Amino acid sequence: MAALSGIQQKELIELVQQHHPHIGETEIRKMLNRAQDIICEETNILEEWFTDTTVADQRYYDFDDLLLKIETVQLTDEDGNYYEIQRLSNPPALGDTA
């Protein structure tokens, strides 16, 4: 789903303010952006992929805050073979943050 253009967002803000004049433009803009995220997440309308380098014995990685959901993880070995990593195939021990 493409982001709302400035004109579309402004029209929606004005429409909301007609019915809820006490709500400010910034709050409405945040609600519109959140609603768009929810629609994208529930419908899987946006799908992208990216590559990253893994580190031996590192369990956790930082990702962009715009990332809504990870569907699959694949690793490539030195020979170019792909392996799909099963979700929580090796769950961390309770309290393990390493």
Image: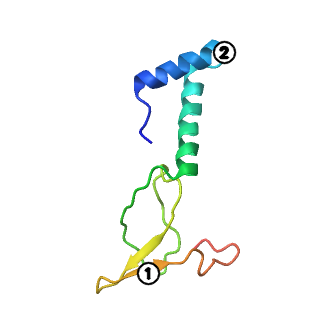
The disc, 2 or 1, on the residue closer to the chain's N-terminal end is 2
Does residue 36 sit above or below 7 in this rendering?
below
Residue drawn at point x = 57 percent, y = 17 percent: 15
Judging from the image, what secondary structure is the residue with disc 1 in? loop
In the shown orientation, is residue 20 left or right of residue 53? Answer: right
Question: Residue 40 at x, y = what percent?
Answer: 52, 46
Residue positioned most to the bottom: 79
Does residue 32 sit above or below 77 in this rendering?
above
Residue drawn at point x = 59 percent, y = 26 percent: 27
Judging from the image, what secondary structure is the residue with disc 2 in? helix
What is the crowding at mark 1: few (fewer than 14 residues within 10 Å), some, or many (at least 20)?
Answer: few
Inter-mark Cα distance, 2 to 1: 55 Å
The amino acid beneath tag 2 is His
Image quarter in which the C terminus is found? bottom right
Q: Nearer the viewer, mark 2 or mark 1?
A: 2
- Which residue matches tag 2? 19
Q: Would residue 65 be visible to someone looking at this image? A: yes
Does residue 21 sit above or below 63 in this rendering?
above
Question: Residue 60 at x, y = what percent?
Answer: 52, 69
Image quarter in which the N terminus is found? top left
Question: Residue 22 at x, y = what percent?
Answer: 67, 15
The amino acid beneath tag 1 is Ala
Question: Residue 94 at x, y = what percent?
Answer: 71, 75
Residue positioned most to the right: 94
**42 or 86: nearer the viewer:** 42
What is the crowding at mark 2: few (fewer than 14 residues within 10 Å), some, or many (at least 20)?
Answer: few
In the shown orientation, is residue 70 left or right of residue 19? Answer: left
- Which residue matches tag 1? 56
- How many numbered marks have been drawn onto this rendered protein structure? 2
Quarter assignment of residue 7: top left
Residue drawn at point x = 28 percent, y = 87 percent: 79
**81 or 22: nearer the viewer:** 81
